[in-house]
Amino acid sequence: MLENIVNALAHHDQTCPMPAQAILLSHFDYERFGWEEVKGVPVQAADDIQPERFRIQCDGSANGIEDAVEDFIAAPRELPVEAPADPVPAITPARTPFVEDFDDLPVDPYRW
């Protein structure tokens, strides 16, 4: 677990412009390992982390994104209403777009 956390911190430092603020562990793992910090980043217990999992917390983290999405969805918005487009001309049996000069074709009495 320690090796995975160290690798994740290195990856985080390379890909995220925000510094890591904390390493979040489940309460079980936090008590089992007894770590106060890893590579200078404090280790904290969190309720939403499953055992044998961890999360690196930083200002660029998506932790709490669910609440932000719910707030966005619940916020009232006005949608712009546009005037309807010009009506599309109807296709009549006398004129079809699939056959050229439909009216000029000879009448076949044996055609259904």
Image (cartoon, grey):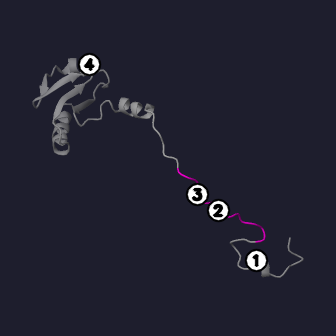
Rounded to the nearest angstrom, the CA distance separating label 4 from label 2 is: 64 Å
Which residue is painted at 21% across and 20% down in the image?
30
**Amino acid at the residue labelled 4:** His
Of helix, strand and loop, which one carries label 4? helix
Task: Name the residue tied to disc 3.
Answer: 85
Which residue is painted at 78% across and 82% down in the image?
104
Rounded to the nearest angstrom, the CA distance separating label 1 from label 4 is: 79 Å
Task: Name the residue tied to disc 2.
Answer: 88
Q: Is residue 87 magenta?
A: yes
Q: Are marks 1 and 4 in contact (CB under 8 Å)?
A: no
Q: Position of residue 47 (x, y in %)?
A: 30, 20
Task: Name the residue tied to disc 4.
Answer: 27
Which residue is painted at 53% across and 51% down in the image?
82
Badge 1: few (under 14), some or many (20 or more) residues near its Cα, within 10 Å?
Answer: few
Task: Name the residue tied to disc 1.
Answer: 102
Note whether 24 is above or below 11 in the view shown: above
**Amino acid at the residue labelled 3:** Ala
Rounded to the nearest angstrom, the CA distance separating label 4 from label 3 is: 60 Å
